[in-house]
Image (cartoon, rainbow, N blue to C red):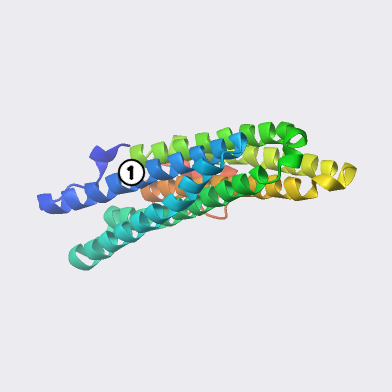
Amino acid sequence: MDKRQISQHISKQYNEELEDLREKVLAMGGMVEKQVEDALQSLIDLNVEDAQIIIEKDAQVNMFEVKIDEECTQVLAKRQPAASDLRLIVAIIKTVTDLERIGDEAEKIAKMAVALAEDERTFSPQRNHLNSLNTLGKHVIDMIRLSLDAFARMDVDAAMDVARLELKIDDEYVGLSRQLITYMIEDPRSISSMLDISWAARALERIGDHANNIAEYTIYLVQGKDVRHTSIERMQQIANNKRK
């Protein structure tokens, strides 16, 4: 399903309002995805200057959320949407909330970059762990991209791919966390820097959770079924049902 299958109305302005909202969500998504990419890179490079820029840009993501929420409220009040249109507005409101929270997690990662860069003594021992963190981060970024693509195309199959990718990310996060704990036990001097890397890994794992939420909203939008807090097998059953 693509954007051409969004309900069409007699009012051309109404159609334009819905499409404008949809495009703003994707624009916000692109901004947030870039924030995560840049935050991860600043952490891998231990680049304080780039990290500070990312921290300052979080306000732009927050304002984007406020703007879209205001426009959704106006559409709800003026158009009183029903059926698929109402699901679209609900999905948009929920999606921008998760995008804003992804932006918050990107800010946390940037702050960890600043903290690690200031502790020069641990630079060498932490490099292997930063590489592992980079691998996790790349997969999380792929997940964001895929979830936004699923939303843009209203593609439940792509949304299911996101759900399956989340399981892989969870396993990677658990594995990295165990490595960090082991290293801290073996070398207590590394505890400070390992905790910073651990918090960054946790932020990435949470970003994956938010990306998965967006995929779930896509299934809700297309199928009219709330798949939150259900097993991946149940999600697949709903995704396989006849499209509404």
Residue 120: percent from left, percent from top: 71, 41
In the image, 118: left or right of 29?
right
Among the 4 quarters of the image, the one containing residue 23: top left
Label tally: 1
Query: Residue shown at 36%/57% (left/top)?
Result: 65
Of residues 208 and 121, which is closer to you in this image? 121
Residue 7: percent from left, percent from top: 22, 47
- Residue located beneath label 1 in the image: 27
Asked if residue 31 can be seen in this view, the reply is: yes
Of residues 41 and 123, which is closer to you in this image? 123
In the image, 224: left or right of 68?
right
Query: Residue shown at 58%/44% (left/top)?
Result: 232
Residue 191: percent from left, percent from top: 80, 49
Crowd band around label 1 with a 10 angstrom C-alpha radius: few (<14), some (14–19), many (20+):
some
Query: Residue shown at 45%/36% (left/top)?
Result: 145
Of residues 223 and 81, which is closer to you in this image? 81
Asked if residue 175 can be seen in this view, the reply is: no
What kind of element bears circle 1? Answer: helix
In the image, 107: left or right of 29?
right
Among the 4 quarters of the image, the one containing residue 30: top left
Query: Residue shown at 16%/54% (left/top)?
Result: 14
Residue 154: percent from left, percent from top: 36, 40
Of residues 172 and 117, which is closer to you in this image? 117
Tell me the quarter of the image containing the N terminus: top left
Q: Amino acid at mark 1?
A: Ala
